[in-house]
Amino acid sequence: MRKIIGTLLFLSVWWVMGGLVACSGASPDQPPKIRYGEDMCDECKMLISEARFAAAYITENGDVRRFDDIGGMFVYHQKHMEPVARYWVHDYKTSIWIRGDQAVYVHSPNIQTPMGYGVVAFKNRSDAESFASEKGGKILTLQDLLANPPQPMMGGKMKMPMKGGVTP
């Protein structure tokens, strides 16, 4: 009887611990939390301060990577090649989270972004096309940006403070 109780206790603890480990990572089905003015960009280590430029991805392990510039997200991914469960970006017009695979991206040297990559995202294609026309930009997809991450262009803001209040 003791052996059965011991086995049941062991299996119960194992089941609970397994559930806790499985639930510890972020869900790719929900946008990650970013604490603006507190969280640092995983690529450049500067504070993330503007939602409309912020981006993130969630790895298959549930780890969250946060970025102050959409372009930085693609550069970081190219360097690290982590298996990604979901990309998240903000709509430039409304600052709401949208799935990266459902976004329409605009790239232009005439768009000032925090690190100068010149990439913004839109939920609606018509908004993206209008903005691209206004800024002399090019419409891109998630796959385009994964295949060819943008390079920083001249004119990026590069003025956001780093954690600890230091500005480069």
Image: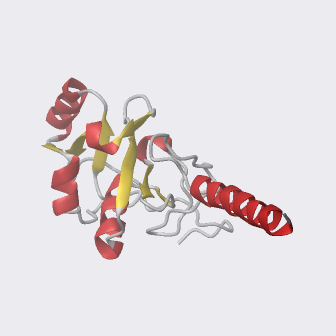
Q: Which residue lies at the image location 33% right of the left edge and 66% below the top edge?
A: 77
Residue 86 location, x and y as percent? 37, 50
Tell me the quadrant of the picture where the N terminus can be found. bottom right
Q: Residue at x 69, y 61 (%)?
A: 17
Q: Residue furthest right?
A: 2
Q: Is residue 78 left or right of residue 73?
A: left
Task: Decide which of 10, 96 is in the foreground and name it.
Answer: 10
Quick check: 125 left or right of 167? Answer: left
Q: Residue furthest front?
A: 1
Describe residue 13's horizontal placement relative to residue 91 as left or right. Answer: right
How did the renderer colour the structure?
secondary structure
Residue at 78 percent of width and 63 percent of height: 4
32 left or right of 146? right
Number of numbered discs visible in the structure rendering: 0
Looking at the picture, how far across and down is residue 114, in whole percent? Answer: 42, 55
Q: Residue at x 46, y 55 (%)?
A: 68
Closest to the observer, 149 or 60: 60
Compared with 104, 24 (above or below) is: below
Q: Position of residue 50 (x, y in %)?
A: 50, 45
**Most extreme residue toward the bottom, as rendered?**
79
Residue 116 visible within the image = no
Viewer can see residue 15: yes
Asked where in the image residue 98 lies, by quadrant, the reply is: top left
Please state the horizontal and vertical placement of residue 74, each as a whole percent of the image: 30, 61
In this picture, is 105 found above or below 41?
above
